[in-house]
Image: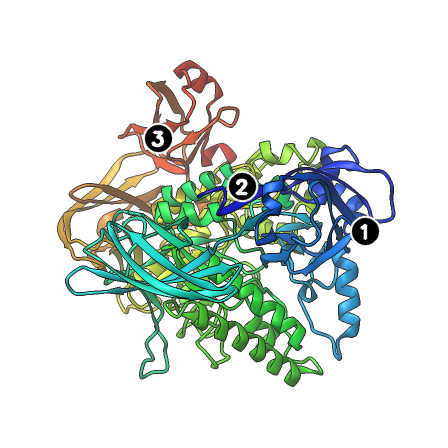
């Protein structure tokens, strides 16, 4: 890019900040936020530690001012147009340069551009961003509304979050702290140019039968002055150009280019993820300005079919293949935006792909993620279900609010539309439930319904204008546009929370037959190591005040303890409690996912709540804050494997055949009934496979009771019963509490294991197994003298993680597990750091 064509000057780095009415100026960072800056200056203690969060609520209630000086090169001032680009201002602010106001902001999710050529001076300049407290702004705006707009509130929160266009979870949630700060949280820079420049683009794809793809490109071109020019598009060796008569200001230029037989982009587990450089060049007056983006070629369809019985299917298809969505919900990686590091995206999204996920739902209570997030999803083959940022509330629908939202949606769709990973635009999180159920008794309910529809319609219209290639889904959950029955499992997507919030047993999952489950989950505690960093050992008890402070669900610890008493013998130590809470979480998700994968193709997706945390706490996450894998992440790695082998116990009559008991074990339907073990194979593979199913009943001492093998042919995307065996023949006269059944499918390339139990784990007669662990060449070997259940391996003092954990070991096998770390770790060091836990040790 020629210096004379376009020049930029970043304003990131060190700024000064102070209370609006104060004179004590401290050094802050841009990008960043006020909480991070106060922490760095030693003004506040870390809000994550103990209950310090309660002591720093004054920060959100205070107005703050950020300023810095900068020198402008004389060459910048020679350009026709000079703008200040603000990609993320959090949230309500007035911006001035050299004492002259250049603009204001009131939306964290928008990208603002202000003309500043008239106020800049050669040499020394000063920019100031004056922030209003988001809490005060929300209160002021709320008082101006003709009627109250209701919202869900949480144990520690600040009111009015639904009034201000800011990350909703900054105001507190049932898994996160209340830290609604302010700051310049994304890039801010000067841009000067005298020739037209491309400020962004969106693309649509038409896939032809011969393998060619027509890419329809819409380039957004900012021209300082009117005049003729040329826009050229180049990708994958093809190019196309168009002569344009530019008007001063923003221009939309459409160019179609036919790309011969490009390699197709696939979701994780279905193929590769080739990405191509998309070059957009604008030439005028002999000067060219070129920008580069990345695209992936894929034919993605969001399919919803109305059915005669009133059902509505929901599935994704990519390049003609049906994709069973396997993934998790995503929340912001930090409670304070200034603490976000790019490496967190690399690690967490890498964890998702490693666990065989192919979809991530960006939940609507956070923010539209940073560019790095979507770039990594493109590279890893993780489809993105993208919520718009509205959650668990109703919202105003006056024209001022709607215009603000429209600009937000337009900005974000244009920013994200070229990413092949982005699969769906979704209107909100649980607002349809809010208006139809939670706030149905509100005195202004009819008005609220109208407001909800006005907001949804405005978002939908804007999405359709900017990106007609993707579907707009009105809400999550939803039964479809204008249906207003968001809790109907037979239609659309479902959030299923009866097991956690409702306290139902895990077997309840087996009674639900949904089309697509976009939220469900169960809580556990993070590792003792993580908790010890923020809660002193004297509070290492689930009912201790500081431990309860790090549990934001009002009855969360009680629910965990109640269900633990059903499943396990009650632990004697806090360490065992944490271990069992994680095993319990894994059992809950196993009960759900196995059942819903068996329902394929009726059910075509499970996205559990949630992948990650933004502070150390008890939550639904599978990866705790700081990056350690909980037991659930290892369980999910197996549940989401390309092929799942699972077992259910059927009575002869077939009633309640696929139900499971409260432990996630195969149920038994009474001692007098004839019972059969059905072994299911569920494939997400686009190609057929053949292999052997092995069903082996063993005592908990490790003795083999019986073994059955069967050759099978597995068709693409098949889910069916592969083997049906009489339970009495499998177990003989061995009591159920002394036996388990091991399952395996050995395909042409991979082996997939599982296990079935017939009694709650607290009733099992587990021997006191000795588990021996050795390390050689970075590989851990695990052996046991009798059956050891839920063997958990960790080396928390070392970088990296074990490749597998939370598995069962019998005396007849040696289990080997790779230790994965970017740092070379000597075997002796790994063995010393390695800890091993299994279920019998908690007895």
Dot 2 or dot 3, earlier in sequence: 2
Residue 95, image x and y in percent? 72, 54
- Spatial separation of the CA atoms under disc 2 and disc 1: 31 Å
> Residue 786: which disc?
3
Label 2 to label 3, Cα distance in Å? 31 Å
Q: Secondary structure at mark 3?
A: loop
Res. 407 visible in picture: yes
Q: Position of residue 223 (x, y in %)?
A: 50, 60
Q: Is residue 274 left or right of residue 578?
A: left
Residue located farthest toward the front when viewing the structure as drawn:
285
Residue highlighted by disc 2: 624
User: Who is closer to the viewer here, 278 or 818?
Assistant: 278
Mark 1 → mark 3, Cα distance in angstroms: 62 Å
Is 745 left or right of 122, judged from the image as shown? left
Q: Position of residue 188 (x, y in %)?
A: 61, 47
Instruction: Say whether disc 2 or disc 1 marks the residue closer to the N-terminus.
Output: 1
First of labels 1, 3 by sequence position: 1
Report which residue position mark 1 lands on. Answer: 62
* Rendered position, 494 above or below 755: below
Q: Give the SS element for disc 2.
A: loop
Q: Quadrant of residue 73?
A: top right
Q: Is residue 525 left or right of residue 52?
A: left
| For discs 2 and 3, the disc positioned in front in the rendered view | 2
């Amino acid at each position: 890019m020629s210096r004379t064509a376009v020049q930029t000057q970043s304003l990131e780095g060190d700024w000064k900040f102070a209370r609006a009415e104060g004179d004590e100026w401290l050094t802050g960072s841009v990008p960043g936020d006020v909480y991070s800056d106060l922490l760095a200056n030693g003004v506040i203690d870390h809000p994550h530690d103990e209950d310090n969060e309660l002591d720093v609520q004054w920060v959100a209630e205070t107005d703050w001012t950020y300023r810095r000086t900068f020198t402008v090169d004389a060459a910048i001032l020679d350009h026709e147009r000079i703008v200040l680009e603000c990609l993320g201002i959090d949230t309500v602010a007035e911006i001035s340069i050299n004492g002259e106001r250049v603009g204001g902001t009131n939306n964290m999710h928008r990208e603002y551009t202000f003309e500043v050529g008239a106020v800049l001076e050669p040499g020394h300049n000063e920019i100031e961003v004056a922030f209003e407290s988001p809490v005060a702004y929300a209160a002021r705006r709320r008082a101006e509304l003709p009627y109250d707009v209701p919202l869900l509130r949480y144990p520690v929160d600040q009111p009015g979050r639904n009034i201000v266009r800011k990350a909703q979870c900054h105001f507190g949630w049932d898994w996160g702290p209340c830290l609604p700060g302010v700051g310049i949280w994304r890039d801010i820079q000067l841009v000067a140019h005298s020739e037209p420049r491309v400020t962004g683009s969106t693309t649509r794809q038409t896939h032809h039968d011969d393998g060619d793809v027509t890419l329809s490109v819409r380039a957004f071109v900012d021209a300082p002055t009117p005049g003729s020019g040329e826009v050229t598009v180049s990708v994958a060796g093809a190019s196309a150009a168009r002569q344009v008569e530019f008007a001063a200001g923003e221009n939309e230029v459409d160019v179609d280019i036919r790309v011969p037989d490009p390699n197709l982009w696939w979701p994780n587990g279905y193929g590769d993820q080739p990405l191509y450089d998309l070059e957009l060049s604008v030439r005028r007056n002999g000067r060219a300005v070129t920008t580069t983006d990345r695209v992936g070629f894929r034919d993605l369809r969001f399919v919803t079919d109305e059915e005669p019985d009133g059902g509505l299917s929901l599935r994704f298809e990519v390049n003609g293949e049906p994709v069973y969505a396997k993934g998790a919900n995503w929340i912001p990686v930090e409670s304070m935006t200034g603490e976000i590091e790019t490496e967190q995206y690399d690690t967490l999204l890498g964890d998702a792909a490693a666990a065989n996920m192919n979809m991530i739902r960006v939940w609507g209570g956070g923010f539209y993620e940073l560019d790095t997030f979507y770039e990594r999803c493109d590279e890893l083959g993780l489809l993105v279900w993208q919520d718009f940022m509205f959650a668990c509330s109703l919202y105003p629908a006056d024209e001022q609010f709607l215009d603000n939202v429209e600009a937000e949606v337009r900005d974000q769709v244009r920013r994200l539309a070229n990413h092949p990973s982005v699969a769906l635009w979704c209107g909100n999180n649980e607002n349809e439930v809010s208006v139809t159920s939670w706030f149905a008794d509100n005195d202004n309910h009819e008005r609220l319904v109208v407001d909800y529809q006005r907001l949804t319609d405005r978002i939908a219209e804007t999405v359709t204008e900017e990106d007609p290639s993707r579907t707009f889904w009105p809400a999550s959950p939803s039964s479809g546009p204008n249906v207003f029955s968001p809790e109907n499992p037979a239609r659309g997507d479902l959030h299923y929370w009866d097991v956690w919030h409702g306290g139902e047993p895990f077997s309840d999952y087996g009674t639900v037959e949904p089309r697509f489950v976009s939220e469900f989950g169960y809580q556990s505690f993070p590792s003792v190591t993580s908790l010890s960093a923020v809660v002193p050992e004297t509070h290492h008890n689930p009912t201790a005040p500081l431990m309860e402070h790090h549990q934001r669900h009002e009855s969360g610890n009680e629910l965990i303890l109640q269900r633990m008493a059903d499943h396990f013998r009650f632990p004697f130590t806090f360490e065992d409690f944490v271990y069992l809470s994680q095993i319990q979480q894994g059992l809950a998700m196993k009960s759900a996912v196995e059942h819903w994968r068996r329902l394929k193709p009726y059910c075509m997706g499970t996205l559990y709540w949630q992948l990650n945390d933004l502070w150390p706490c008890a939550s639904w996450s599978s990866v705790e804050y700081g990056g350690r894998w909980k037991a659930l992440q290892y369980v999910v790695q197996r549940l989401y494997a390309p092929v799942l082998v699972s077992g259910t116990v059927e009575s002869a009559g077939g009633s309640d055949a696929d139900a499971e008991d409260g432990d996630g074990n195969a149920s038994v339907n009474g001692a007098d009934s004839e019972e059969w073990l059905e072994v299911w194979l569920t494939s997400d593979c686009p190609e057929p496979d053949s292999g052997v199913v092995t069903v082996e009943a063993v005592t908990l001492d490790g003795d083999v009771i019986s073994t059955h093998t069967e050759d099978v042919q597995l068709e693409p995307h098949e889910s069916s019963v592969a083997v049906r065996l009489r339970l009495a023949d499998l177990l003989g006269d061995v009591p159920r509490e002394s036996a388990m059944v091991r399952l395996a499918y050995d395909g042409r390339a991979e082996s997939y294991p599982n296990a079935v139990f017939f009694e709650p784990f607290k009733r099992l007669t587990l021997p006191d197994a000795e588990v021996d662990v050795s390390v050689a060449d970075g590989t851990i070997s695990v052996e046991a003298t009798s059956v050891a259940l839920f063997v958990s391996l960790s080396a928390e003092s070392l970088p990296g993680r074990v490749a597998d954990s939370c598995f069962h070991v019998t005396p007849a096998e040696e289990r080997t597990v790779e230790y994965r770390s970017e740092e070379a770790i000597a075997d002796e060091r790994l063995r010393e750091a390695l800890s091993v836990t299994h279920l019998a040790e908690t007895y």
